[in-house]
Image: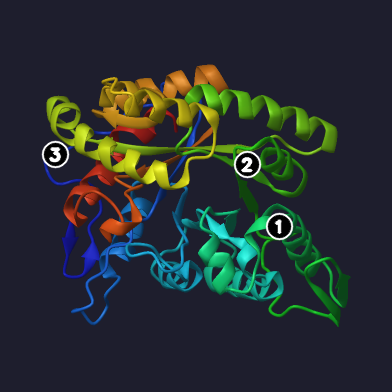
């Protein structure tokens, strides 16, 4: 709990089961920080950074922040907020999930991320993706139609200017004379690049140019498996490590009846509305076609392969299943996240609910895989 503006160590008395020994294969866990903001306060993002502190104390490996322009409940400048998180934490890794790299000048992004790498003592990972809204590209002077090619070039530029001094580049979208980006990143050879996407071209791009592939969170486990086969084959061709991160939306609570009977229907309704905004593959389109045709599709059917939900024991069983089917060793949970942009709400749940989920997950789920 929060005491005097700091985060106390450990759960409230009697609220959590003490961690037990590791029972399953090792898994790292990360989480998405919700954007909780109170503009009436001197520090309007205090609850968001408090959640990062709780995550650090509870054994999470990384926290990430998303990126969208012109959308209520989303953050236009995640790198600045991550600087605040870096200042309040000491061991927790920080990342973007995801940053829309093709919209922005990659040399400027390289400078910002290298600065964060210095501020954090080498704790930043840059998760990147294409996004789905053409307006963001238009306003920022980019081009939605060439977003894949822009991503390829931007990733190449990041790696170039982070690993070489006196670098120069002549490309299709960006060119620059000999220069040295300052500051130099702390991590060598460079801050990790996590590349998102589920189209074959995006998955192959992650294998060639990324340090890890970000999978999900919208896609079903079956879709994740088919993408994973593409990724592993592409990594073998490129001679790279097939590292990847499974992202899942999540809601965990001590009372399964409450989670499944009361929270899940409302949460899945919100998720489905958002997925309509950004649907990417045929499986999701088929799901919407069933619903639009009048078929009753239960929240549990939709959640079964797409969410972590229920009690800690339920979530442990779900992660064990994901492990068995995919071999995943890094799971990223987004507690209550994924609501449609027009709601102006970053996530389902207030600070106290999300903090309790992080604690419950940290004290009962993570030790089973630690």
In the rendering, which numbered label is found on residue 146? 1
On residue 15, the disc is 3
Q: Nearer the viewer, residue 129 or 48?
A: 129
Question: Image height check: is 258 above or below 15?
Answer: above
Alpha carbon distance from label 2 to label 3? 36 Å
Which residue lies at the image location 51% right of the left edge and 65% below the top edge? 135
Q: Is residue 165 above or below residue 75?
A: below
Q: From mark 2 to mark 1, how far is it between C-alphas?
A: 21 Å
Mark 3: which secondary structure? loop
**Toward which corner of the image does residue 153 lie, by quadrant?**
bottom right
Instruction: Decide which of 222, 121 is in the foreground and name it.
Output: 222
Tally the marks: 3
Sooner in the amino-acid sequence: mark 2 or mark 1:
1
Q: Is residue 24 visible?
A: no
Residue 11 at what x, y percent from top left? 20, 46
On screen, residue 227 above or below 179: above
The residue lying at 37 percent from left, 33 percent from top is: 367
Q: Earlier in the sequence, mark 2 or mark 3?
A: 3
Alpha carbon separation for disc pair 1 and 3: 51 Å
Q: Which residue is mark 2?
A: 213
């Amino acid at each position: 709990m929060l005491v005097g503006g700091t985060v106390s160590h450990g759960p409230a008395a009697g609220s959590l089961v003490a961690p037990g020994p590791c029972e399953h294969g090792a898994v790292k866990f990360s989480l998405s920080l919700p954007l909780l903001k109170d503009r009436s306060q001197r520090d309007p993002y205090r609850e968001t950074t408090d959640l990062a502190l709780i995550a650090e104390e509870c054994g999470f490996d990384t926290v990430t922040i998303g990126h969208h322009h012109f959308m209520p409940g989303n953050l236009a400048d995640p790198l600045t907020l991550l600087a605040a998180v870096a200042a309040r934490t000491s061991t927790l890794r920080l990342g973007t999930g995801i940053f829309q790299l093709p919209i922005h000048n990659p040399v400027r992004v390289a400078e910002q991320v290298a600065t964060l790498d210095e501020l954090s003592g080498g704790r930043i990972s840059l998760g990147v993706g294409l996004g789905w809204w053409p307006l963001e590209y238009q306003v920022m002077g980019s081009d939605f139609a060439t977003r894949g090619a822009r991503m390829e070039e931007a990733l190449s530029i990041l790696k170039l200017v982070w690993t070489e001094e006196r670098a120069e580049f002549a490309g299709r979208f960006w060119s620059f004379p000999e220069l040295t980006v300052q500051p130099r990143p702390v991590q060598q050879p460079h801050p990790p690049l996590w590349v998102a996407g589920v189209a074959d071209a995006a998955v192959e791009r992650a294998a060639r140019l990324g340090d890890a592939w970000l999978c999900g969170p919208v896609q079903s486990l079956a879709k994740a498996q088919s993408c994973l086969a593409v990724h592993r084959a592409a990594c073998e061709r490129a001679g790279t490590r097939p590292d990847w991160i499974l992202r899942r939306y999540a809601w965990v609570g001590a009372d399964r009846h409450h989670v499944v009977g009361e929270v899940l229907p409302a949460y899945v309704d919100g998720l489905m509305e958002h997925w309509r905004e950004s649907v990417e593959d045929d499986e999701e389109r088929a799901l919407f076609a069933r619903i639009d045709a009048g078929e009753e599709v239960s929240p549990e059917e939709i959640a079964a392969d797409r969410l972590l939900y229920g009690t800690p024991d339920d979530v442990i069983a779900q992660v064990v299943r994901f492990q068995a089917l995919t071999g995943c060793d890094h799971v990223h949970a987004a507690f209550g996240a994924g609501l449609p942009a027009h709601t102006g709400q970053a996530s389902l749940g207030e600070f106290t609910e999300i903090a309790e989920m992080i604690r419950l997950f940290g004290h009962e789920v993570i030790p089973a895989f630690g």
